[in-house]
Image (cartoon, rainbow, N blue to C red):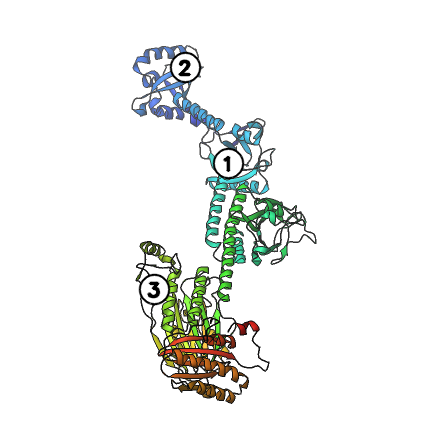
Amino acid sequence: MSEIPGTTGDVVWQSSPPGSIYDYIRVASFSIGADGLIEQWSRRAAGLFGMAADEAIGRDPVEAFMPAELRVDGHRRVGEILDGKEWTGLVPFRMPGEGGAHGLAEVYVMPSETADGERAALCIVVDVRALRRVETDLAASQAIFGQSPFGFVLFGTDFTVVRANQRFATVFGGAADDHRGRTVDDYLPGPEAERLGATLKRVLETGESVTDLQLVGPTPGGTGRRHWSMNLYRVHSGAGRPVGVAGLATDVTRRHIAAREAASARRNLALLNEASARIGNSLDLETTARELLDVAVPGFCDLATVDLYQGLLTGEEAAPGSWAPAHRESAGGSAELRRVAHASAVADALPTAVAGGGAPGPDDLPPALGSVHRFPFGSPCAIALRSGQVEAVPGDDMGFVQSTLAVPMVAHDTVVGLVQFSRTKGSEPFGERDRVLATELAARAAVCIDNARLYRREHERALILQRSLLPPGDPEAAGLDIACRYLPGNTATEVGGDWFDVIELPGHRTALVVGDVMGRGLRAAVAMGELRTAVRTLALLDLEPAEVLSALDEVARGLGSPGGGERSEGLGGSGGAQWPSRAAQKSREADLSEVYLATCVYAVYDPVTRRCTFANAGHMPPAVVEPGRPARLIDVPPGMPLGVGGEPFEEVEVELAENALLTLYTDGLVESRDQTLDEGLDALRTVLTGPQMALEDACDFVLSTLDTRHGEDDIALLMARIQGLPGEAVGDWTLPREPRSVGRARELARSQLMAWDLDDLVDTTELLVSELVTNALRYGEGEIRLRLLRDRTLVCEVWDAGLVQPRRRRARDTDEGGRGLQLVGLLSAAWGARRTPRGKTVWFELALPTGAPAAELSVEQLLSMY
């Protein structure tokens, strides 16, 4: 812009800047001389009419620019003007440069005089079309600015408000004109005002527009936070000169709230999804509580704690309904709880908020992790436990914790504990949506904790049942040094069906049993108990090992049928063929999934001969290590598992060397997911071939050396060192089948007992031997064999070839005999009979003398024999 100093006072003349109003409305001028011809022609006239000055000067304006039909009237008007009459009006004209199109001009004609005094005229012309466009643009601009539903504000180059519309004034108060001259500091707090001011400066300098600038501030006279979105762009004059920055402001508070709620909903859904994946992966109560806090902190809150009822953690059982909160309260407050977990996302934070609100005093400090405590009766936490509803806990006066939610952990209408979620100052306070999420998180964890409690209870019951069925301590057996171990699976696995047993048999023989019921849990433990009881019962019948397993197979199949062992019904009367009824068959097929399968190895060891007879039902092969030789697996035909049925079992008899080590075990010792069975058996042989050591140490060495996978499966291990009865502890004679053998038997028994220094047992033994040999002569067949065995007790055995088993009966008063077995039963510690491959054996057992006088028979016992 240029300035030209004037000659008068402070008057300053300046040229019209580009883009002035005259450019928009297209004003032009020309003059007419006394002859009615154009005398002067301005440059603006040349631009308006499209004719240069040399073309226009000297021409008749009516003839040059007006249509033919208007020329007569035009000449008359020019004559009037030259006569000194002013005139204003709309005059049509032809646009030479636009293909002869007509235009419309508003003409202002003012008479004038030349230097010679002749009449002339000065004409001012405005293009009506341009004027109408300017009017339209002004009207449109005013409509947009004044009627816009958005706040519209125009900042000048000094960043003060030049103009604002009524919508802007409605939001920020006052009339539109009241905002002239204000700055951004009048509308926004410091940081936001600085940010907007810097943005305005950048837009004005660079011309780059800014869209969706997010601003936050309070409304006039209010305390609520409002959110605005501003679009800013630079405004120019017609010549392109920047004259300010225009801003279009939109209140997006509702949109912001909706977006925040949507984000909160997405976050909550993500948290619930994460909770489903991470909570309840363990059956440990405290681990489940920590999993809950791992999800909640810091995704949902800043601090959190979990308290569980002490009775739930200690496994105390109570009547149904006693877990309800009403039964837990006491006059002093809630029932005892233990703090099992806490988590914090804030550095130097307290482990938990103060439960009752307010500043913590000496007695109000949060419970330490692992401590047992009670919540005061009237505290929000105790109320939440009683009501089962979420309670809000006030923040502390120290200004650290803003708010806390005390959420009861409810599972199956049972409160198992309390979780507290806390947010510190600076975090968003809890809302209603947060209360719902907190309740859902606590409920999911509560269900997992209650399931863990129920599982632990069932697991402990099964474990107690299982251990109660195992032999207590280290069992003793004649001619055997025995050590055994049972290792249950870890807490993450259910109780299995592994078992072992050592059963004393007549004749100082011993039955060694190791078995494994397939499956886990309480039902497997119960099935194991039933099979173990059946094994002991069958062993007392002194059956051969293959016969024991065959009978045990029937028992195992009966466990899976609804009727237990009643698996078939007789068709055709007593002694006829046994066939399953159609109803029983259908029931069995329907309940096939409940059939229990088990593996078992059954061995009978005779210390006199050091021979061991094995029978196997699908179990791991026994292992034996003889002195100076590597360990080997005894080749016992495995047979089918118990419960399959239909296949006979085979026996293998093996003579074991003195001091040999016999090992029976379950598959948990040699088989795992990372190791094949063959690899496990090879490893077992290698370990057993190691240096000889005490039997108890050998058990521990095997378990610690082999890779048992840290208790993935139960392990039963039974190891026996072979210690046969010495020859001097056995008396064995064969007697002819004749009456004098009775006296000979008494003499042999007396002599043997005297040699063993068992004088106190001579009379009783002679009497009982006489009775058994007499019965063998009277009821038996073939030659008679008498054997005395001395170990922990004295055993006397009388063998014959007869198959008729002796039967004890009560003799009538008139009977002269029939009291022999009654006498044996009264005077011996135990007696019995068993079948042998070539007949039968009748035996009795006497306890070795301890130095105390022998107990005398009572009168009732003596009279019972008569």
Depth-wise, is mark 2 or mark 1 nearer the camera?
A: 1
- x, y percentage for residue 113? 44, 15
Any part of residue 64 in sight:
yes
Assess disc 1: are there few (<14), some (14-19) or many (≥20) residues with their C-alpha within 10 Å of its C-alpha.
few
* Whether residue 827 is situated above or below residue 319 in the rendered picture: below
Depth-wise, is mark 3 or mark 2 nearer the camera?
A: 3
Viewer-nearest residue: 208 or 445: 445
Residue topped by disc 3: 644
Viewer-nearest residue: 782 or 18: 782
Any part of residue 642 in sight:
no
- x, y percentage for residue 289? 54, 55
Depth-wise, is mark 3 or mark 1 nearer the camera?
A: 3
The tag earlier along the polypeptide, 2 or 1, is 2
SS category of the residue bearing label 3: loop
Q: Residue at x 40, y 86 (%)?
A: 735
Viewer-nearest residue: 335 or 468: 468
The tag earlier along the polypeptide, 3 or 2, is 2
Horizontally, residue 714 falls left or right of residue 407, namely left
Q: What is the C-alpha distance between the residues marked 3 and 2?
A: 122 Å
SS category of the residue bearing label 2: strand
* Whether residue 510 is situated above or below residue 6 in the rendered picture: below
For this orientation, the residue located farthest to the front is: 814
Q: Amino acid at mark 1?
A: Arg
SS category of the residue bearing label 1: helix
Residue topped by disc 1: 254
* Whether residue 6 is situated above or below residue 571 in the rendered picture: above
Residue topped by disc 2: 89
Q: Amino acid at mark 2?
A: Gly
Q: Which mark is residue 22?
A: none
Q: Amino acid at mark 3?
A: Val
The tag earlier along the polypeptide, 3 or 1, is 1
